[in-house]
Amino acid sequence: MSTPTFGSTLARGALAGVLAGLAGAAVQYFLTEVPLEAALAVEEARPADPGAAEHHGELFDRGTQLLGGLLATVVFGLAIGAVFAVVYARLRHRLPGRADFDRALLLGGVGFLVVSLLPGLKYPANPPGVGDPSTVEERTLLYLAVIVAGLVLANLAPWFNRFLAGKGWDRSTRLAVTGLSTVVLLALVVFLLPANNDPIPADIPSTLLWQFRLYSLIQLATVWTVLAAAFGLLLDRQQRTAEAPALVA
């Protein structure tokens, strides 16, 4: 089986990223936008702060903001697709699986777990009007700390698996011990890092808050799923096309 070139892998990653961004934009438009609009309505209904500076209105209307958000999701998909392709090109020989589609799905699952699900569970997304603006920098650093810790553990897991293999452990036991150890360490990361103590305003319904958080995770899961599946299918198709002349010969 031939190894795809870096250029072809990067091009397919970018294309898969655009498709993933379009899928994420669709979820944003039909799902995430519903609680987002409700949160904006609550925020606008709040009485004006007398000590605040004079309000000059929004620079862009809501329709323009929505279009910009959808385009940003597509651009995000393109960027993450390119990064995904670079990581895949470097790790392809180390990823288990009989085909590129299997390997791509595995890498996509790890990416979603480390980059989206783990930090999303510890510091879930909040709609507009929730969160103290003065703590944005602190919350951003903590969010990045969860991602870094997850990436470190994701890289340690294969090393630990190979270490156990060198000790003569059988494959099923190695996978069970490695998986359990990784889950325990991830749980410790979530438990030990400080929580976000920003108060939830009383005028934000709990159903709206959790609906926004759930839809945000669904949007991210959609992006990662479409990215991994499209990337794997594109690579498999390239592989079959490259091998066809040899089979005919």
Image: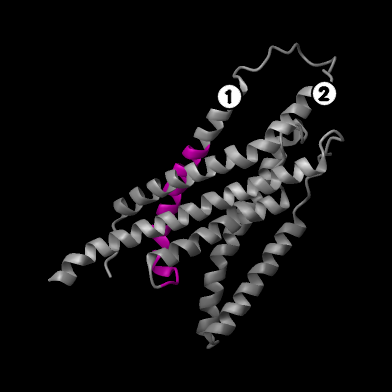
Q: Nearer the viewer, residue 92 or 17?
A: 17
Q: Which mark is residue 144?
A: none
Identity of the residue drawn at 48% across and 42% down: 22
Relative to 58, say whether 120 is above or below.
Answer: below
Rendered image quadrant of residue 203: top right
Specify which label sits upstream in the sequence, 2 or 1: 2
Q: Is residue 181 part of the magenta span, yes or no?
A: no
Q: Residue at x 82, y 23 (%)?
A: 46
- In the image, 11: left or right of 52? left
In this rendering, the answer to whether 197 lies above or below 68 is below
- Which dot marks residue 46? 2
> Which picture quadrant has residue 55?
top right
Q: Position of residue 228 (x, y in %)?
A: 46, 56
Separation of disc 2 and disc 1 at Cα? 22 Å
The residue sitting at 61% across, 51% down in the picture is 116
Write down the region rendered in magenta: 73-97
Residue type at mark 1?
Gly
Q: Is residue 82 magenta?
A: yes
Q: Quadrant of the C terminus?
A: bottom left
Horizontal and vertical percent position of residue 88: 42, 58
Taking the view exactly as shown, the residue that stands out farthest to the front is 30
10 Å neighbourhood of mark 2: few (<14), some, or many (≥20)? few
Residue 245, position as x, y percentages in the image: 16, 65
